Amino acid sequence: MRPRRIVSDFKVTARGYLRNSAAIFFSLIFPVILIGIFGLIFSSSGSLPTLYVLNADHNSAASRQFLATLNATHAVSVSLVNGETPQGFSDYLQSQQYSAGLVIPAGFGTAYAAHDPVQLPLYVNPGDQATSGAAEAAVGSAVTAFNLHAANGSLIVSAAMSEIGGRTYTYVDYLVPGLIGFSILTSPMFAMTEVTATYRKEGLFRQLSLTPLTRAEWLTSKIMWYTALTLAAAAIMISMGYFLLGARFIISWEILPFLLLGPFLFVSLGMLSGSIAKTPETAAIVGNIITFPMMFLAGTFFPVSSFPPFLQTIAHLLPLYYVIDGLSAVMLFGNNVRALVDLVVVLVIAIVIFIGAVLAFRWREE
Amino acid sequence: MAGNAIEVSGLTKAYGPLRAVDGIEFTVPAGQVFAFLGPNGAGKTTTTEILEGLRNRTSGNVRVLGLDPWKEGDELHRRIGVIPQEFKFFEKIHPREAIDYYGDLFDRPVDPESLLKRVYLLDKADSKFDTLSGGQKQKLGLALSLVNNPEVCFLDEPTTGLDPQARRAIWEVIRQLKADGRTVFLTTHYLEEAQLLADQVAIIHHGRIIVRGTPGEIVASRGRPDRLRFESGPELARYLAAHLPFAVTSEDGHVDVEIATPADAQRVFDTMSTSGLGTPRFTVQRDSLEEIFVRAVGQMDDGLLKSEGGA
Ligand SMILES: Nc1ncnc2c1ncn2[C@@H]1O[C@H](COP(=O)(O)OP(=O)(O)OP(=O)(O)O)[C@@H](O)[C@H]1O
Ligand SMILES: [Mg+2]
């Protein structure tokens, strides 16, 4: 292993890559677009589910007080609906595809002041668990507060609710580690599969075999390059998630081992799939067969815990799952023990695949 | 510069039932230019790549600089320069960078400017490889093969696809390589090139060497005698045939008289002047390597010429 040769090959690789606009697009720009699209879809109006409220009792102080209480729960964001009637509200919600709506009936203020029982119709879409659950919780706690106040009571028993991990997670929080995993997977896999197969077909490996560059040096420089690319992509995605989408996560050095081992694993896997295929065309197919399941099932776009059980089982067979799980463990939960387990799994898989790739990879043929 | 740079004996390479190389034998003394000729599919590239250590042989003995190319490739590759028949390289690299890259790989100081100038590629020093023309790519291949200051250069059709000026530039490079004391193993389809550059020539056909020697020897032993050619008709032919002991033929408005020495030529001209048939324009015809090549290959295909095998 001569550093001069590795560095020189690294420079050549980097220049070649940077001069290839398609490669740059897929490795750096595409993940940014993905994060933007997914972020926008799943975090419309901040990160809280929206509760649509028809206030048919506008002018009463009590109705305004109730709205303020709802807002104070921080479980939903309240959006007022005007120009609808309480009778048509359910149809209205359906036509707009809104998942949760509440009606404050006319006379609410008077009834409340008179201590007359009054009902607030709450409409939820059971298909959207997240929104309807949040709406029920928010309305429930506002109603309780009002009842206590009317009875001049104060809260005696209360649950101090917080979500697992100590904070509330939103979809974009999950999205960032998932998409970092996506880019750790896709840019080396697609590029290395193609490069390995085409270089062999075009005789470039034979050309290189005529120089003192060794296979290990060549592979090292590729791993270095895709690691650099991964670090850049991760930095872009983390800052995009943080500044544009308001995602929150822990940034600590424990992320690094995954950003180093991930590319190591997938550069090797790409080289392996490019080496076992006879032609660049079959290499592309082999590469896709390996890449696509991982792209969707390893927790890239959605947390694996939200999958049906049999898909979860499949996810646990995919190397990328452990990269993403480890990244989430560090970035979301600060669970370094779990991350360490994931890291060991990734390391073992990476070493096995690396050895397989070096064995399958030939500079020259008989 | 003593000894042989390349030694080959009993070399065969089989692809299934096809014997692409079928028992060939030759040596190339250090410092010489060896030209390997043969029609398409004759086995030139196969042989060349076996010598370079890029392909394994089926049987036979091969030494390049005293090394077994397949087993001792790593050491050999530091000492030889290679341009493959179709040189391909990284799509996006610039020639200047490619030369620096090779300099780093071989751990040698290089001057891309002078190297590129030498192969007439300086104007494309900073263009992407995939935008170069076929000939320009080939020139870069040649430049790269020289980076490690090789003792033996293997050039597989280095001038195919080059324009006449570039071809002459490459010839100049090859002459320079020889002047530096390097050994050159050259394959080519241009017989003229072999005749101009090579100390030794071998013609291979169907995996066997059918003709070997210096260009001069080959022309002398295989070529037809020199001919005086007159632009004249059968009348002159009949007159000369009647008055001279030389073979005379008449065809397409010209008359050929086979001669061996300048004195023979003198006799032809003397006889002409007494013929009263005037003094037509004349040229001297001599077989080139090309004609010998075409005839040798044609005869072998007709089953007329028995192969010399490795001899
Ligand atoms: N990898 C291979 N597998 C099978 N047959 C091969 C292989 N390489 C070469 N051959 C066959 O071996 C024979 C010699 O090929 P080779 O490339 O050595 O010819 P060549 O003399 O260099 O021809 P050209 O002038 O066209 O370059 C051909 O018949 C070719 O089809
Ligand atoms: Mg050839």
Image (cartoon, rainbow, N blue to C red):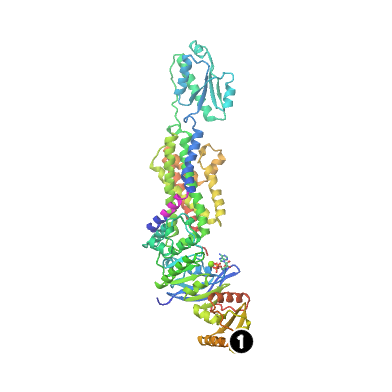
Closest to the observer: A146 or B169?
Answer: B169
Q: Is residue A244 found left or right of B283 in the rendered image? A: left
> x, y (%) of residue B291?
56, 76
Above/below status of B245 relative to B307: below
> x, y (%) of residue B239?
61, 86
Tell me if residue A19 is in the magenta stretch. yes
Check mark 1 vs ligand 1: CB closer than 8 Å? yes or no. no
Could you tell me what secondary structure mostly forms the magenta stretch?
Answer: helix
> x, y (%) of residue B95?
43, 58
Q: How many marks?
A: 1
Label 1 crowd (10 A; few <14 / some 14-19 / many >=20): some
> x, y (%) of residue A149?
45, 15
Closest to the observer: B50 or B59?
Answer: B50
Name the quadrant where ligand 1 sits.
bottom right
Q: Is residue A181 found left or right of B227 in the rendered image? A: left
Q: Secondary structure at mark 1?
A: helix
| Callout 1: chain | B
Read off the residue under disc 1: B239
Residue in the image at 57% along x and 27% along y: A96
Tell me if residue A229 is in the magenta stretch. no
Q: Which residues are magenta?
A: A10-20
